[in-house]
Amino acid sequence: MACVRRPLKHAIGLGLLSCAVTAYASLARAQTCHGQFRSNVADEAGRATVGLNFLSAGFETPRFTGHYEGLGAELGWAQGRGQLAATWNAYRLSKNGADIHGVGDPALAARVRLTEESAALRVGAGLAAAAPVGDAKHELGMGHFMVTPEVWGELGSQRRYLASSLAFSRALGAGAHHEHGLSPLVAPMTASEVTLDLRGGLRALPNLALEARGRLAFPAGVEGDARAHVTGVVAIPFAGGESAVELSLPLAAESFDWRFGTSLRWFL
Amino acid sequence: MASRLTLLLLLSCGLALGCAGAGQNESASGAKCGQGAGLDYASFGESFMRDYCTACHSSELEATQRSGAPSDHDFDTHEGILRTPLEHLDHVAGAGAHVVNTTMPPAGYPQPTRQEREDLAQWLACGAP
């Protein structure tokens, strides 16, 4: 019986914590509602994770030139066929000589695996949502809710895998005012967007994992430019956790010139 | 499991909905063009922009000198003003029968008088001739 109750306690605890994280920010409103899960095979079932991440990016758009730095917390939980992840970042955004500080939009994502874990091809569905907490006027947040249902699939094992997801992001309550243009932080930039993610990874050494990602996003039913970028990730597992660094470079129409991230994640 | 995940998601989103911040308080001032007949760039617009706007909104400034002003909002020439949606200028700095908008200039910079904001809104309502 205790074995049955424990996951439920974890779920309630994580849910309350996510709610608290989301509720705490009444001052400010960010960025993307999608992509909270690194890799399904990397997340071991039955574990909660807590992580810290830092990111930095440079940008030059028709309206603004500058850079931003972000520091964020992430919570993750995996049990059986389900996964939950919550992320929330605070930013220093420097654009055209002005420094803006504040939190972004917190995001919560859930995934369910529809096939057996042992299947050669594992597929599933998910739903992510971001809440308008970040200051939209200063482009720290979207200024509206964003929901992103997705389907995903993956092949392989922790040693070697290929994964892909297809997602549809939709702004809620933004009307015609959603178009963010090339906003340094906020993505998607249109009211409706379809996103295709591809990623492949391998464990090159016992304590070294590599991952390559690509993202293609294009407006759905609204005007706008398709955008694309690639990301390289180096992850180093350690006892009880994992550290990672990543570098993203734009291929088309992205608002950043480069984006660097590093993270630490512990298994609880 | 799926029902628990769904419940947690709904709980979090519901809470976030209740705590989301208020929207911006910028709107049309309500100024009409007839009230501002006679104002033009030479008699009003140029000096208003020079006194209150071009410290940041000038094509002569480098990006890092603009104190956050967007690179496509330059008001040091008549053409630059006309490239900007006039309604936007009214919404951030104009005054009229409906509201006095004071988003711009930001705090810490010289502020126009109420009369100057009303003149700005009327000039903009006429198309900023």
Image (cartoon, coloured by chain):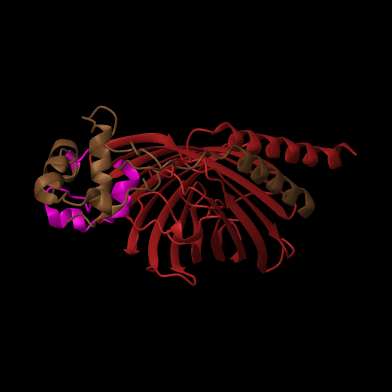
Q: Residue at x 44, y 67 (%)?
A: A216
Q: Nearer the viewer, residue A99 or A158?
A: A99
Q: Residue at x 16, y 41 (%)?
A: B48
Instruction: Determine if the magenta segment contains residue B82.
Output: yes
Q: Is residue A218 above or below residue A89?
A: below
Chain B tint as drawn: brown
- Nearer to me, A153 or A59: A59
Residue at (13% x, 50% y) in the render: B41
Q: Would you say A258 lies left or right of A19 here?
A: left
Answer yes or no: is residue A221 visible.
Answer: yes
* Span of residues in magenta: B64-93
Residue B12 is situated, as x and y percent measured from the top left of the image, at 66, 43
* Image quadrant assignment for residue A223: bottom left
Along the line of sight, which residue is nearer the eye, A156 or B42?
Answer: B42
Q: Is residue A187 magenta?
A: no
* Residue A65 seen by the camera: no
Q: Position of residue A120 (x, y in %)?
A: 67, 69
Residue A131 in picture, x, y percent from top left: 56, 46
> Image quadrant for the N terminus of chain A?
top right
Residue drawn at point x = 30 percent, y = 35 percent? A99
* Left or right of A213, for residue B105: left
Q: Name above or below for residue B63 compared with residue A157.
A: above
Image quadrant for the C terminus of chain A? top right
Q: Which chain is red?
A: A
Query: Percent position (x, y) of residue A4?
Result: 85, 42
B54 to A41, vertically: above or below: above
